[in-house]
Image (tube, rainbow, N blue to C red):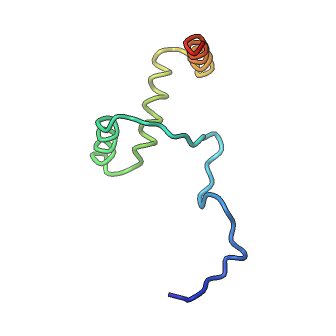
Amino acid sequence: MKEQYDFSTGKRGAIDPIPQGKTQITLYLDDEIIDWFRETVNAQNGGNYQTLINQALQDYIQQKGESLESLLRRILREELTTSK
C-alpha cells in the first residue's frame, strides 16, 4: 500500500451511471419479499432480484390494464387527498 495516493484527477459520483429511463430510489420492503425474489433468481441460475421486482411490478400494472400514467395520477390524487 502506498503512503500517498493522487486523487487530483478523481471524479465524484457513481462509478456506474444510472441507465436512462431508470430512477434510483430507496424502497423499504419486507424481508420475506426480498428473500422470495432472491430465492427465485437463484433458482433460475442467477440474475438480478431488483430486475425481477421491476418486471413483477410492470406485469402487475399491465395486468390491471391501467397505464403507468393513470396509475401515477391516481396514486398522487389519493396521497394529496389523505395528506390534507
> Residue sitting at 54 percent across and 88 percent down?
2
Looking at this view, is 23 or 46 the one in front?
A: 23
Position of 34 with respect to 63 (left or right) is left
In x, y percent, where is residue 30? Answer: 34, 34
Q: Is residue 18 above or below residue 84?
A: below
Looking at this view, is 34 or 20 the one in front?
A: 34
> Residue sitting at 60 percent across and 41 percent down?
22
Position of 4 with respect to 44 (left or right) is right
Q: Quadrant of residue 24?
A: top right
In x, y percent, where is residue 36? Answer: 29, 38
Q: Is residue 83 above or below residue 13?
A: above
> Residue sitting at 65 percent across and 44 percent down?
20
In this view, the residue farthest toward the front is 84
Position of 11 with respect to 43 (left or right) is right
In this view, the residue farthest toward the right is 9
Q: Could you tell me which quadrant the C terminus lies in?
A: top right
